Image (cartoon, rainbow, N blue to C red):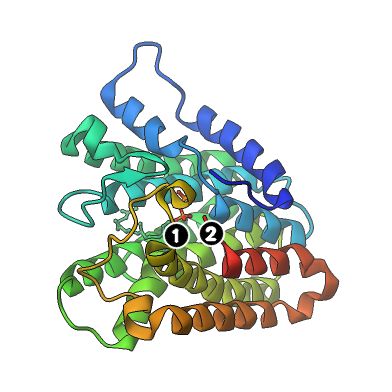
Amino acid sequence: MPPLPAFFAAHQDLVARALDALVPAAARPTPVIDAMRYTLLAPSKRVRAVLLMLSAELCGSSAKALPAACAIEAVHAASLMLDDLPSMDNAPLRRGRPSAHIVFGEAITILAAFGLLNEALGHLARSYDAALSQRLSVLVTGAVGLDGLVAGQAEDVAATGAAIDFDTLERIHRRKTGVLFSAAAAAGALTAGGSADDIAALTAYAKNLGLAFQVVDDLLDVTGTTEETGKATRSDARKTTFVSFSGVDGARALAGELCRTAQAALTPFGRRAARLNELADFVAARRL
Ligand code: GRG
């Protein structure tokens, strides 16, 4: 994977080590644990974890943020495993490796995804006091649920091969991608005791950042390489994407506009938001 901005590195290492501990290798390996670790620990940007940690820092401290960052990354990894299945996106390559179902089969992959989801929620419950773990659980289950990943994916599956309008496309991806970004930012703020105003501003930032991230994902499917993205490219032919809707230049302009809207939401934080501004610049220009 090509190098990421320097400020990613410290958080990425911390998160990678904590994820390794969250799903430890079994003394006697089992296929389902192997499959959980295969996708969870594969090299990746960890952008949602980094967003969570930076949001916590902005609200005072990231000292308590790591378990929530791991939970969000475990949910994300589960969603990737399910998304790649033949009955969904049928994607052969993920994080630079054959997708989990190619290595472990569909049944074990589905079980491993449920395993990761379960570990994510268990980790939140174990890692925080009752009040904070309750608020974080509401956030994360909300992001997965009927106004989040599951709803977005269901509408995406239904839309495959069909003509959809821009509002539908946007709703699908706000749910599939944007909502988990928002949950990550809000969760970071919560772990640092952020105020309701902090949480609202960070949620607005992350909602637009997440949609921008998806628009760039669509762009990279057309303009990127497998070496850069770790995924098969030119794979979205059966789908309406931001590129098929708006063209490469239109999608690039949209991503830039969404990142600027995201950054505008950070205005109340002033210079304290420098890192999150940098993260938005990275998302707009990313090649991986
Ligand atoms: C029950 C958890 C659960 C999900 C069910 C399958 C599903 C519903 C939703 C799929 C959501 C999905 C995979 C959206 C795509 C988001 C996206 C842009 C993924 C790529 O993220 P990156 O680039 O990947 O951050 P890395 O590998 O760096 O983590």
As drawn, the label of residue 204 is: none
State the residue in front, 233 or 55: 233
Answer left or right for 72 relative to 99.
Answer: right
Residue that numbered label 2 is attached to: 287
* Residue at the image position 18 percent from the left and 70 percent from the top: 160
**Quarter residue 277 falls in:** bottom right
What residue is drawn where x is 57% and y is 40%?
Answer: 127
Mark 1 in CB contact with mark 2 (< 8 angstroms): yes
Residue 270: x percent and y percent?
82, 76
Looking at marks 1 and 2 on the same chain, the residue that comes earlier in the sequence is marked by 1
User: In whole angstroms, how far apart are the C-alphas of marks 1 and 2?
Assistant: 7 Å
Residue 133, visible in the rendered structure: yes
Amino acid bearing label 1: Gly
Q: Residue at x 62, y 58 (%)?
A: 51
Q: Residue at x 26, y 45 (%)?
A: 92
Q: Secondary structure at mark 1?
A: loop
Question: Which image quarter has ligand 1?
Answer: bottom left
Q: How many numbered discs? A: 2
In the image, residue 204 sits, relative to residue 88, either above or below, namely below
Q: Is residue 171 visible?
A: no
Q: Which percent across, then down, holds residue 112?
A: 30, 36
Q: Does 167 sit left or right of 155 as displayed?
A: right
Left or right: where 251 falls relative to 155: right
217 left or right, relative to 68:
left
User: SS class of the residue under badge 2?
Assistant: loop
Crowding around mark 2 (Cα neighbors within 10 Å: few <14, some 14 to 19, many 20+) is some
Q: Is mark 1 within 8 Å of ligand 1?
A: no
Q: Which residue is mark 1?
A: 224
Crowd around label 1: few <14 · some 14–19 · many ≥20 (10 Å): some
**Of the pair 187 and 91, the residue shown nearer to us:** 91
The amino acid pointed to by label 2 is Arg
Q: Is mark 2 within 8 Å of ligand 1?
A: no
